[in-house]
């Protein structure tokens, strides 16, 4: 019995040693695995999260860029067609021009700031060129007896003649300033700013608040809101928008929007008799030359 017991102990000793060795190896492997997991948590997971964020951001930017390119392509085609037909026509389109002026004069009479309906004289089209560009212009002359307010409204109309969108109402410096503020405060809102600037000016004049709220909702920055309000609140722009607001129903009904591009070649005030004054205007109605048709 003693011999058997001793033999059993001798056989168990190596097994015990092997067990201890395996346990030690297991502990070392577990420790190494724990360190690897910890290292992954410190580096791998944050990197993976950042990678997913970068991929998501890149996806959003790609979508915004695609949408902006599509809008630009659609808007360019539409505006070129409008320019050809209404703003810079390749035909004389004198009936439409005279109908627009009649509408403005009627509005002034309704406001009691125009004493009598003026006679409009239209001359022969003349080809012009400057800076490598060619166009034709039709001289338009008339004399009005109006109050100072009436003359101011008439100038407000002439300032907006030929404008299509909100961007036309603003100066290049204004647009550059808005772009800079957007890039500084929220670059993702560039698309919203572009959409705002491309809004039809007549629609904006009728109901500006929804378009401004939509833009400011995408770019909730007090400085941007202040600058935009100041730009739109300039007296010359405010009076132009107010006039378009009043004329909008008739312009739409008679299909006179957008208005043909008009520039003031000469304006003279004379015969001031409170509250009336005589104002003589020579305008240039712009259009495309025959070879541009």
Image (cartoon, rainbow, N blue to C red):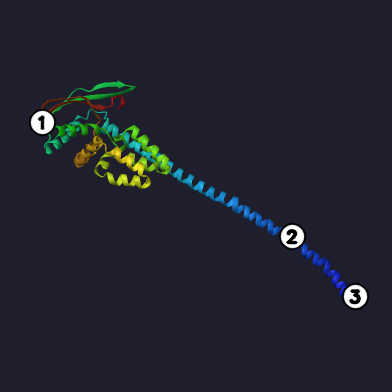
Q: Residue at x 39, y 39 (%)?
A: 181
Q: Which mark is residue 173?
A: none
Let me know if residue 198 appears in the view.
no
Q: Is residue 22 left or right of residue 137?
A: right
Q: Estimate the spatial distance between the alpha carbons at disc 3 and disc 2, rounded to whole Å.
A: 34 Å
Compared with 211, 146 (above or below) is above
Secondary structure of the residue carrying numbered label 2: helix
Q: Nearer the viewer, mark 1 or mark 3?
A: 1
| Quarter occupied by residue 236 | top left
Q: Nearer the viewer, residue 96 or 176?
A: 176
| Quarter occupied by residue 227 | top left
Q: Which mark is residue 3?
A: 3
- Specify which label sits upstream in the sequence, 2 or 1: 2
What residue does disc 2 label?
25
- Specify which label sits upstream in the sequence, 3 or 2: 3
Q: Residue furthest right?
A: 3
What residue does disc 1 label?
276
2 and 1 marks in contact (CB < 8 Å): no
């Amino acid at each position: 019995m003693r011999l058997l017991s001793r033999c059993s102990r001798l056989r168990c000793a190596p097994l015990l040693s092997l067990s201890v060795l395996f346990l030690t190896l297991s502990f070392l492997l577990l420790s190494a695995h724990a360190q690897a997991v910890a290292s992954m948590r410190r580096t791998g997971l944050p990197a993976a999260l950042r990678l997913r964020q970068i991929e998501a951001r890149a996806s959003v930017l790609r979508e915004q860029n695609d949408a902006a390119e599509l809008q630009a392509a659609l808007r360019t085609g539409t505006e070129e067609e409008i320019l050809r037909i209404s703003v810079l026509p390749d035909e004389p389109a004198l009936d439409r021009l005279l109908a627009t002026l009649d509408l403005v004069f009627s509005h002034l009479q309704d406001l009691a700031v125009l004493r009598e309906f003026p006679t409009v004289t239209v001359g022969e089209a003349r080809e012009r060129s400057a800076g490598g560009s060619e166009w034709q212009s039709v001289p338009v002359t008339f004399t009005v007896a109006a109050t100072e307010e009436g003359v101011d409204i008439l100038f407000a109309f002439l300032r907006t003649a030929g404008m299509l969108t909100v961007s036309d109402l603003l100066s290049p410096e204004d647009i550059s300033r808005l772009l800079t503020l957007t890039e500084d405060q929220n670059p993702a809102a560039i698309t919203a700013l572009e959409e705002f600037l491309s809004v039809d000016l007549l629609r904006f004049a009728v109901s500006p608040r929804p378009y401004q709220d939509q833009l400011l909702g995408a770019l909730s920055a007090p400085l941007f809101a202040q600058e935009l309000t100041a730009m739109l609140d300039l007296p010359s722009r405010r009076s132009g928008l107010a006039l378009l607001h009043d004329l909008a129903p008739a312009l739409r009904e008679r299909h006179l929007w957008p208005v043909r591009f008009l520039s003031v070649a000469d304006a003279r005030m004379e015969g001031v008799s409170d509250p009336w004054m005589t104002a003589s205007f020579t305008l240039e109605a712009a259009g495309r030359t025959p070879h541009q048709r």
